[in-house]
Image: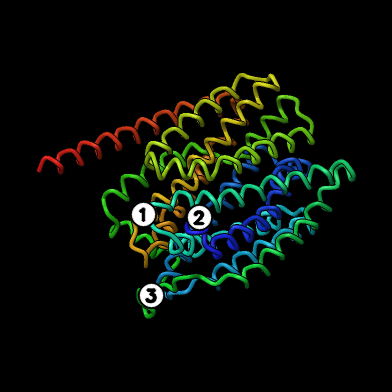
Amino acid sequence: MSKIISRTVVVLAIVSLLGDIASEMLYPIIPIYLQSIGFSAASLGLLEGLATAMSGLSKGYFGQLSDIRGIRMPFIRVGYLLSAISKPMLALFTNTWWIFTARTADRLGKGIRTGARDAVLSDETTPEYKGRVFGFHRTFDTIGAAIGPLIALALLQIYPNQYRLIILLAFIPGILSVLCTFAIKPKNAPQPTGSKVKVTFFSFVTYWQQATPQYRRIVLGFLAFALINSSDMFLLLRLKQIGFSEQGVVGVYLFYNVVYAILSYPAGALGDRWGFGKTFTIGLVLFATVYGSLAFVNNTPIILGLFVLYGFYAASTESIAKAWISNLAAPQQTATAIGTYTAFSSICGLLASTWAGIVWQYWGANYTFVVSGVAALGVAIYFKMIETKMQHFDTDLEKC
């Protein structure tokens, strides 16, 4: 294990754990809090979509900037700091634009740090172990996502409906994550790809033209899935609609994150062994199963079983996607490659959360979940076709 997981990977994992405790203390209560101050399902979907778009687009910009300047740690530190500061901002005022600013600041912080952080993870290992490294990091990240709701659940028991108090307390683990970044010492310093190159907010788009056809085919599949993968907040609202209490919603979300954390490293190892394409496709089928079932099921044991599958889906897709992309990019362009994907994905995420909120409000939750489930099966077929095509290509090369 020590040969695969370096000290830098471990410290980065701890940083992410603390950052996610801060974020996930709020995630399960934000939709309830926002509804309590007047947000509708449609406006909630638009808010989350716009915040996701800001996060993704900034990942493209700051990822490319990190590659061009040849530096990683300043982006990581500033990103975690901005996210930490954004937490107490949510509790100060209830004005719509202020809430939007606070959520956007949180997501912008994620955008600033993600490309540089993932590039450091990629630089710390070799291609045959990237699934494990990204899976290990995701395990700690998700443990934080489990601890956060657990803290929120305890606080809700002691201080019912005191959402602002929980939001203020989330600042503590957030600032601790920033302090831990000063213990990170990356193994490999990246070589600048052009310190005099002018970088604009959308200049990362040029990487799409430079990327290999394989990168574009795979990322197109990721983006198709992002178009139907709306915010998890809709899952939480669905639980509330079915009849779960606020504590029950947080409890199920906690349960999901525990499953996600347990399965992240094994899923990464599975990706290294079976191939990223096959593992990702399995995740898509699980997603379709969960979403299709949640349109009709209201039985608590079955719902818990579905969230076990949802944890397996998450473990089989997010870190796998990043590991897959990092293997398709040159080392000095890793942050740009991942940032470009997440930037385009954020636009799709904006559309996904927006249409999901509108469909929910005007036609009902069932339609939202059925459409997502069926579309996910279509994306799974696309990845299966890509895998088959690549196998045929490899066979033809061997014959030559």
Say which residue appears at 46% left-offset and 53% top-offset. 342
Q: Can residue 195 be seen from the camera position used here? A: yes
Q: Are marks 3 and 1 in contact (CB under 8 Å)?
A: no
The CA span between labels 3 and 1 is: 18 Å
Q: Can residue 354 be seen from the camera position used here? A: no
Quadrant in which the C terminus is drawn: top left
The residue furthest right is: 158
Give the label on residue 327, or none. 1
Number of residue marks: 3
For badge 3, the amino acid type reads: Gln
For residue 199, side relative to residue 32 (left or right): left
For residue 280, side relative to residue 106 (left or right): left
* Helix, strand or loop for disc 2: helix
For residue 389, side relative to residue 219 (left or right): left
Which is more toward the observer, 88 or 80?
80
Mark 2 highlights which residue?
A: 56
The CA span between labels 2 and 3 is: 24 Å
Q: Are marks 1 and 2 in contact (CB under 8 Å)?
A: no
For badge 2, the amino acid type reads: Gly
* Label 3 or label 1, whichever comes before in sequence order: 3
* Label 2 or label 3, whichever comes before in sequence order: 2
Circle nearer the viewer, 1 or 2 = 1
For residue 313, side relative to residue 105 (left or right): left
Q: Are marks 2 and 3 in contact (CB under 8 Å)?
A: no
Percent of width and height locating residue 46:
59, 45
Percent of width and height locating residue 74:
55, 73
Percent of width and height locating residue 281:
41, 34
Give the label on residue 191, or none. 3
* Helix, strand or loop for disc 3: loop
Query: Quarter-wise, where is residue 157 in the image?
Result: top right
Q: Callout 3: few (<14), some (14-19), or many (20+) C-alpha neighbours within 10 Å?
A: some
